[in-house]
Amino acid sequence: MTKKIEAIIREDRFNDVKEALRAIGIIGMNVTEVRGHGRQGGISLTGRAGDYSVDLLPRHQFNIILSDHNVERTIQTIIQAAHTGNTGDGMIFVYPVEDVVRIRTGERGHTAITYDGDIDTLASES
Amino acid sequence: MDQINSGDTTWVLVASTLVLMMTPALAFFYGGMVRRKNILSTLNLSFVMIALLSVQWVLYGFSLAFGPDHAGIIGGLEYLGFSGVGASPNPDYASTIPFTAFAIFQMMFAVITPALITGAFVERVRFKAFLIFSLVWATLVYDPVAHWVWGAGGLFHRLGALDFAGGTVVHITAGYSALAFAMVIGARKGFGRRTFEPHNIPYSVLGAALLWVGWFGFNGGSALAANGVAVNAILTTNTAAATAGLVWMVLSWNDHKPSVLGIITGAVVGLVAITPAAGYVTPLAAMAIGAIAAPISYYAIRFRQRSNLDESLDVWACHGMGGTWGALATGLFASKAVNPAGADGLFYGNPAQFTVQLLTVVVTVVVAFSVTYLVTKLLAKTVGLRVSEKEEEVGLDISEHGEQAYA
């Protein structure tokens, strides 16, 4: 089975998370810039005279498609790299994926998300 | 026989160019503070004034402002289409440059003044109504007030009112008209319930920086000669802007953090306040004028915010109040030692000068506010002053111009 991980993290943790994911063999991913808020609610910025509050803050969202058995390890890796302990660290969502198609080859399912040197090959080598 | 001086003429032409640049500079200063769906609209509100008012000025604006006087109220129609405005100097205004050079320099002031007002009604004004308003406003407010203050025989000119580069003619008229316009057009949808974040503060920094540079032409050029008065005006201009920027920074720091948007706003307010005084006061007086201008406008913005009026980019607080302070301060700090063609102010033993300044300010405030209020009410009832709710939500770039800024 295939899953999708959406991980919303702080902008300043972006490179750490990306490198940590690469280190465990997560090769395919895309990233979107999002704005939002959770419990943190927003921040106060300085205006021309006095303050104003901004409720939607910029964050990065990693979108990763991977096999079931790699989900837990990936989640732990993201948490480790993105965690600061303050409100606003972000959220991780996991969804089931119906199917995956690699447009170049027409491969489907698990083979469509397999790469040389990815998390599964690294695991079988060790 | 008046002789054309090439140094004087060159300086006035260069100064005209600098003042021309101030209108697109203002466009970016304002543009950075609106939401991204209204950036083109906001830039255009200023830019199109260069086109509209340049034509108005040549056709009849200059004649109404600087044509031969009628009862101190308005200029005659002798200079329609710039007829009779040629290479020979007009000693009533400047005896060493072609009269046309003076008319071109003044054209750039007529252009930027209605552009200043646009900060009051960005993100919701109907473009067609805005064009009509600007033309009517230039004819009924700017041209007459320019004549009263600067025209040979103008009623305040006769009384000896001092307005070196347009504190009254430009900034008070624009500031109080902005207040009236904002009251009539009403607040932007969602005002008071959600935050209107400035979408590109770097644009505003760029705009303010270019305004500062352009202001050397605005104030320095108002000497209408390359002489000691021009040099003094540039020094006082820079000093007032610098001081007001610093003071604003401290006020902002005290409230939260030293805001960049605040520092540049402070500098612009300093430039506004020194405008009427630039050629008449010492650099230390300029420092005092800038230092006092900053808190006046800063707390005017806070007051405006609390009063829940959506005078969106604080034209009244910055130009109306800054200009009022500057015009009154001219009546305090002016000195004949700086400029023998000027007058002594209250601090130099001439309280009458302050009274004249106060009278000029009060009459100008009343005229600018009430004429704008009536004209905008009339436009609201006829062509419609603002776009529909749906057009406002979509943004004026798409709904009024069919364009998007960032593809």
Image: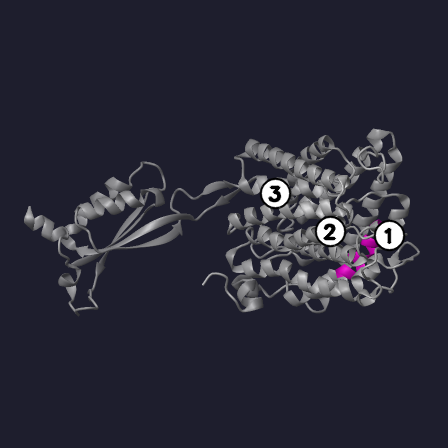
Which of the two marks, 2 or 1, is nearer to us in this view? 1
Q: Residue at x 20, y 57 (%)?
A: A3
Indicate the position of residue A107 as horizontal and vertical percent values: 15, 67
What chain does badge 2 belong to? B
Q: Which residue is mark 1?
A: B2
Picture disc at residue B379? none
Q: Describe the element under mark 2 as helix, strand or loop.
A: helix
What chain does badge 1 belong to? B
Is B194 magenta? The answer is no
Q: Which residue is mark 3?
A: B265
Residues drawn in magenta: B137-149
Q: Which residue is mark 2?
A: B12
The foreground one among A96 and B319 is B319
Q: Describe the element under mark 3 as helix, strand or loop.
A: helix
Tell me if residue B250 comes above or below residue B401 in the rendering: above
**What's the residue type where badge 2 is placed?**
Val
Indicate the position of residue A56 as horizontal and vertical percent values: 43, 49
Separation (CA) of disc 3 from disc 1: 42 Å
